[in-house]
Amino acid sequence: MIGRDGQPARRMGRVLPLGVAVVLLTATAACRPDLTPPGAPTSWPVASARHWQWQWQLDGVLDPTVEADVFVLDPVTTTTAETAELRSLGRRLVCQVYVGSVHPDDPDASRYPAHLRGAAVAGTGRSWLDVRRWDALRPVLADRFRLCRGKGFGAVLLADADGYAHPSGLPLEFDDQLQFDRQVAGLARSLELSPGLLGNLGQVTALAPDFDFAVNEECVRLAQCDKLLPFADAGKPVFHVEYSGSTADFCVTSVGYGFASIRKNRTLDAWRLPCPPA
């Protein structure tokens, strides 16, 4: 299923009720060695900002052997055993959560009443959400973040955090989105997760102080990498991916900006081709 900008839709999978999740996590913990808890939240040393190697995998069987410091994963399909293995290898784990949209197949979709839903997110089957209704959205997002934390993630990547910039079918303004994104970042911190921003280049300058890292798709192809400088100039990681072109071509640009860059398939399976570290 293809989403906006020609990219495949990446769904939020099944979210377990908190009580069930706790039981499962407890049983799993009894079967493996104790691990040091993830950072609270994950820290991103400024000295390392230009040197991270990263992986973004939302499709297929997880490959824990990838030589990457940072893994961005689906918090639902990724198992506690898999996160435990990655953490035992010293990897930093980021869960990707859709905060501004909902899919009818999401097991918690019923928690989003019809009056909160707007137009379809082009080609994805998802619907934009009315981010002005923080009172209604906060409890659902908090449960999703708790699932991340319970599975051992130390950071969260906020997806679909830019509904104001799309035909959402809702009267969302720039300031509505800005307030919501800041509230979600604050919620993540309160649950000991480091917040990261996916896309939303139109608000990067305003939001960079509120987020610890950014993830970008195709800023070289789209000639938009300069918009991410508020993160890079502050010593915060920018994790960047291109889906076409040779690394010999785009790495010169992206690494020059100080980004951690890779080439991926649009499906975001295990395959990756990293740029040489800066």
Image (tube, rainbow, N blue to C red):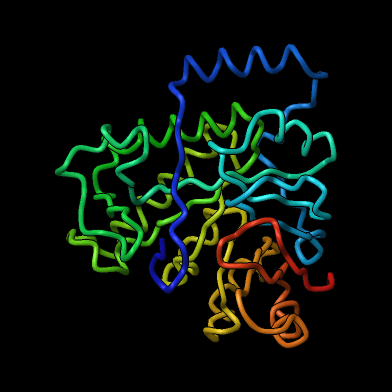
Q: Position of residue 212 (x, y in %)?
A: 61, 53
Most foreground residue, 268 or 204: 268
Q: Residue at x 68, y 61 (%)?
A: 237
**Residue 161 occupies quadrant:** bottom left
Please state if 259 lies on the left or on the right of 208 as rendered. Answer: right
Please state if 211 lies on the left or on the right of 50 as rendered. Answer: left
Against 139, residue 56 (above or below) is below
Against 207, residue 78 (above or below) is above
Q: Quadrant of the N terminus?
A: bottom left
Q: Quadrant of the C terminus?
A: bottom right
Against 218, residue 40 (above or below) is above
Q: Residue at x 31, y 65 (%)?
A: 122
Q: Position of residue 272 (x, y in %)?
A: 72, 64
Q: Position of residue 151 (x, y in %)?
A: 62, 29
Most foreground residue, 258 or 205: 258
Please state if 245 lies on the left or on the right of 189 as rendered. Answer: right
Most foreground residue, 8 or 154: 8
Q: Residue at x 40, y 37 (%)?
A: 141
Q: Residue at x 51, y 29 (%)?
A: 146
Q: Position of residue 184 (x, y in %)?
A: 43, 44
Most foreground residue, 156 or 42: 156
**Residue 120 occupies quadrant:** bottom left
